[in-house]
Image: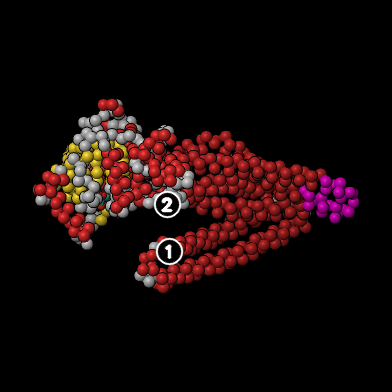
């Protein structure tokens, strides 16, 4: 929920602060993902529990072993090997089973973790793809990708760690305390007094160190950001001869991060030193106190050995519980970030609604009193009571200064957004009542002349317009788009990989592939968002030829950024400030001597410069 904070006392403009509240962790969402893996998860928990119980048994059995050795030393009779064999074999068996259980639960748990994470990734990606264009206006792509990758990764490792180590640490702490008490209530009492103080102090220092480490990491990221910006915009840096200054900026941040990391290192060193001393003193103290109990015959040496090992286990378990606590917090906040978008419903649903049978579709489009502002800029009205009819099989061009709202008209026809008021109609039906998927995939062809190609083959790029198209259909579309010639000129023909790390195509070639991609749907309505950057004369001629062929027999809306290509349009509309200020054919508008002839004059003048 966005809060609006307005300061009533002074006259500064109202500041709209969109606070991104920290999303809640939803247990029921987690449950939906865990449910299919429940059997494996329960098995993992049982195995992990078993391994932890055995870990408690091991110190007791070590004590038995020591007692055998001690007795042998004292009495020096009997067969040492014979006597020790029983307890030693039992212990070995226990080690073996403990190892097996450990491997077992790790295998199961990593299976559960990976499957839950994969499910989350797929569900989140599906949910993101379903969102409206407005959602992507408001959210940065980088952050969305981060939720798919880093956040799910973090959640997965926390999930696995908390279940395996959490279970083990808690079981061991409780179990070992029971054994400690059984072995010697007196010594246990002593430990209960000392241990919590030490663990508490350790946790305190630990959390301080974690904060230092987080700050140091943030500083490293800051330094990286400086380098990233400078290297990413290296041409600008060089053009202004700013290498020296960028270096200074970077050096400053790096030095700061170096200092912080050194401080962190010192902190860790002191912590390690202190905790070693403390732990060793505990051993010494236990042996000292235990020794007095042995002399007064209240304890055997084996009991002391068991006690030492068990109390070490307790220490380790408590330490790992305190670390796990931080992990739980981190995992839950990553999980919450992942879950936030899972439940988000787009305001424009992709499917549902009516379709018009192909043979009765005329392709007439009416914009009626459409007003619109972008959801990310609610105060700024882009279209104001805009009305326009695209008659069937006719070409209508929209011209006008940049920022006048031309592309917005095309976005509304594609239903990337819904109008704030007014309606857009297809064959007399409000497009909000029509099936969006059908509208986009079969009725409207969109040719953005600064086209985006995917990093796959030419064939796949054209087939993007109609996934079920045969090779022959692809080739036919390419021929219509004047692209067949240059494609077959490549050594790999239609299998040539384009886009990132593929063959680099010229602007004109890309445009023709984009035209083929739109034509393969055989759309009734074609929207051309013209390129703002000019092609060279020869490319322009072939592309124009392809477009002339493509527009024949279709309802066409041209968003024209240059005027040279639209003179043959059936209707030319001049847009300014979100409304049509002039309309007619090229000849009519020229003779009128209004906005259009003004625009023409200005563009000619610019062309001659
Ligand atoms: P044109 O195509 O005539 O150059 P546009 O339709 O692209 O104009 O833009 C009209 C206005 O809407 C401009 O003021 C522009 O800043 C704004 N605008 C365009 N796209 C968005 C968007 N996605 N979010 C917010 N404002 C936008």
Q: From this view, report whether residue 27 is shown above or below residue 186.
A: above
Q: Earlier in the sequence, mark 2 or mark 1?
A: 1
The residue nearer to you, when weighing 157 against 410, is: 410
- Residue 323, percent from left and from top: 55, 54
Which residue appears at 69% of the width and 45% of the height?
99
Q: Do we see residue 243 in this rendering? A: yes
Figure label count: 2
Furthest-left residue in this view: 592
Element type at mark 1: helix
For residue 343, which numbered disc appears in the image? none
Q: From this view, report whether residue 587 is shown above or below residue 279.
A: above
Residue 199, quarter of picture: bottom right
Q: From this view, report whether residue 461 is shown above or below residue 217.
A: above
Element type at mark 2: loop
Q: Which dot, 2 or 1, sits closer to the camera?
A: 2
For residue 504, which numbered disc appears in the image? 2
Q: Do we see residue 197 in this rendering? A: no
Colouring rule applied to residues: secondary structure
- Location of the C terminus (image quadrant): bottom left
Which residue appears at 85% of the width and 52% of the height?
72
Magenta-drawn stretch, dominant element (helix, strand or loop): helix
The residue nearer to you, when weighing 495 against 400, is: 495
Q: Which residue is mark 1?
A: 231
Other-residue count near label 1 (Cα within 10 Å), few / some / many at <14 / 14–19 / ≥20: few
Which contiguous range is marked in magenta? 64-85
The residue nearer to you, when weighing 328 against 545, is: 545
């Amino acid at each position: 929920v966005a809060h609006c904070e307005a300061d009533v006392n002074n006259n500064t403009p109202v500041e709209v602060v969109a606070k991104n509240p920290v999303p809640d962790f939803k247990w029921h969402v987690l449950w939906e993902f865990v449910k299919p893996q429940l059997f494996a998860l329960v098995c993992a928990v049982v195995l992990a529990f078993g391994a932890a119980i055995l870990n408690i048994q091991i110190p007791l059995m070590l004590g038995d072993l020591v007692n055998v050795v001690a007795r042998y030393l004292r009495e020096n009779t009997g067969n040492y090997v014979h006597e020790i064999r029983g307890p030693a074999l039992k212990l070995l068996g226990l080690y073996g089973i403990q190892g097996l259980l450990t491997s077992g639960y790790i295998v199961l748990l990593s299976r559960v973790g990976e499957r839950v994470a994969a499910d989350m990734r797929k569900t989140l990606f599906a949910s993101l793809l379903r969102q409206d264009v407005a959602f992507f206006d408001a959210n940065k792509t980088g952050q969305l990708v981060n939720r798919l990758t880093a956040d799910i990764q973090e959640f997965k490792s926390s999930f696995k760690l908390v279940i395996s180590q959490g279970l083990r640490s808690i079981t061991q702490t409780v179990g070992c305390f029971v054994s400690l008490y059984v072995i010697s209530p007196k010594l246990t009492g002593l430990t209960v007094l000392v241990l919590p103080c030490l663990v508490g102090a350790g946790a305190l220092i630990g959390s301080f160190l974690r904060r230092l480490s987080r700050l140091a990491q943030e500083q490293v990221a800051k330094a990286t950001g400086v380098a990233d910006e400078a290297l990413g915009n290296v041409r600008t840096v060089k053009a202004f001869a700013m290498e020296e200054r960028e270096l200074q900026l970077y050096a400053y941040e790096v030095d700061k991060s170096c200092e912080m990391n050194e401080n962190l290192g010192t902190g860790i060193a002191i912590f390690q030193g202190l905790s070693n001393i403390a732990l060793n003193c505990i051993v010494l103290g236990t042996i000292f106190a235990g020794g007095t109990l042995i002399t007064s015959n209240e304890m055997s040496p084996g009991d002391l050995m068991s006690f030492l090992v068990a109390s070490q286990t307790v220490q380790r378990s408590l330490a790992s519980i305190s670390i796990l606590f931080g992990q739980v917090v981190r995992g839950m906040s990553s999980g919450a970030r992942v879950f936030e978008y899972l439940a988000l419903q787009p305001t424009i649903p992709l499917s549902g609604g009516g379709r018009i049978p192909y043979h009765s579709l005329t392709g007439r489009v009416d914009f009626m009193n459409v007003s619109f502002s972008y959801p990310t800029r609610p105060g700024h009205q882009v279209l104001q009571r805009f009305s326009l009819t695209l008659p069937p099989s006719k070409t209508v061009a929209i011209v006008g200064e940049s920022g006048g709202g031309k592309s917005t008209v095309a976005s509304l026809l594609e239903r990337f957004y819904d109008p704030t008021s007014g309606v857009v109609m297809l064959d007399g039906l409000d497009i909000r009542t029509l099936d969006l998927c059908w509208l986009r995939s079969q009725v409207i062809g969109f040719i953005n002349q600064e086209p985006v190609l995917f990093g796959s083959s030419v064939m796949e790029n054209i087939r993007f317009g109609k996934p079920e198209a045969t090779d022959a259909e692809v080739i036919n579309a390419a021929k219509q788009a004047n692209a067949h010639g240059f494609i077959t000129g490549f050594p790999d023909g239609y299998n040539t990989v384009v886009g990132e790390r593929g063959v680099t195509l010229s602007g004109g070639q890309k445009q023709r592939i984009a035209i083929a991609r739109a034509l393969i749907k055989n759309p009734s309505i074609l929207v051309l968002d013209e390129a703002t950057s000019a092609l060279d004369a020869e490319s322009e001629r072939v592309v124009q030829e392809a477009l002339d062929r493509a527009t024949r027999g279709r309802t066409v809306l041209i968003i024209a950024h240059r005027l040279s290509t639209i003179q043959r349009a059936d209707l030319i509309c001049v847009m300014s400030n979100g409304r049509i200020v002039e309309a007619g054919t090229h000849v009519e508008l020229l003779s009128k001597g209004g906005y259009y002839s003004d625009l023409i004059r200005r563009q000619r003048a610019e062309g001659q410069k």
